[in-house]
Image (tube, rainbow, N blue to C red):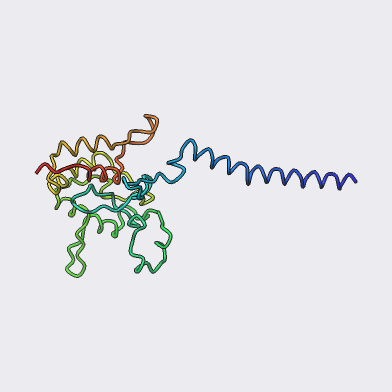
Amino acid sequence: MSFAREASRAIRSTLVLWVIAAIIYPFVMIAFGQIVFPSQANGSLIKNQRGQVLGSALIGQPFTSDRYFNSRPSTTNYSTGDRQKDDAGVLQTGVSGASNLAPSNPALLERIQGKDDPNKRVEGDLNRLKTVGVEPTADLVYTSGSSLDPHITPAAATAQIARVAKARGLQPQQLETLIAQNTNGRFLGIFGEPGVNVLKLNLALDGLKSVS
């Protein structure tokens, strides 16, 4: 009888703990997140005035047009690459990750500095930026560890002011103000570095009117 009683107690305890840990706790956390942090709990989605989802404040998007502030490079093209040419199948569900190329790796140097070989000419990020009048910064040349970073540094955004202002017929002062308004400070004032969310900045940019 003692064995049966102990076994029954162990089974009941297991069931109670399972209900608490696998059902009650997750639902309490879901409810807490939806009530206290609804935006973060639902992916920090950014929507337009019509309620259409344009992206997430947590995941970068590729911007390359002269009319927009460009994002930093991405080894995964922010997981929006051509799935028709995705032989490895890495873009089917979205991926993140760095290139893991050492600073001396020829492939990395070729991408950044370019290559003049007639058989395989590569413009290089440095030459591309300088051609459009942008002074290269580290985050406009190097990818992030996740390749999904939605931010650039204020310096990287400032370096693009002249190009964007010319393409849109705006005054540089307008863009300086816009960058300042969309710059996130350090977390709790001490952790990390200030950053500019490129998607939010470009959405605000579309709201400006040309002065020309």
Could you say which is closer to the camera, residue 60 or residue 48? 48
The x and y percentages for residue 96 are: 40, 54
**In this image, 188 relative to 158: left or right?**
right
Please tell me which residue is depicted at 37% across the width and 53% down the height of the picture. Answer: 98
Please tell me which residue is depicted at 87% across the width and 47% down the height of the picture. Answer: 3
The quadrant holding residue 93 is: bottom left
The x and y percentages for residue 129 are: 18, 51
Could you say which is closer to the camera, residue 82 or residue 145? 82
Residue reaching furthest top? Answer: 189
Residue reaching furthest right? Answer: 1
The x and y percentages for residue 108 are: 29, 56
Residue reaching furthest left? Answer: 212
Instruction: Pick the quarter of the image with the C terminus.
Output: top left
Please tell me which residue is depicted at 33% across the width and 61% down the height of the picture. Answer: 81
Report the number of numbered marks: 0
The x and y percentages for residue 86 are: 37, 67
The quadrant holding residue 20 is: top right
**In this image, 207 relative to 44: left or right?**
left
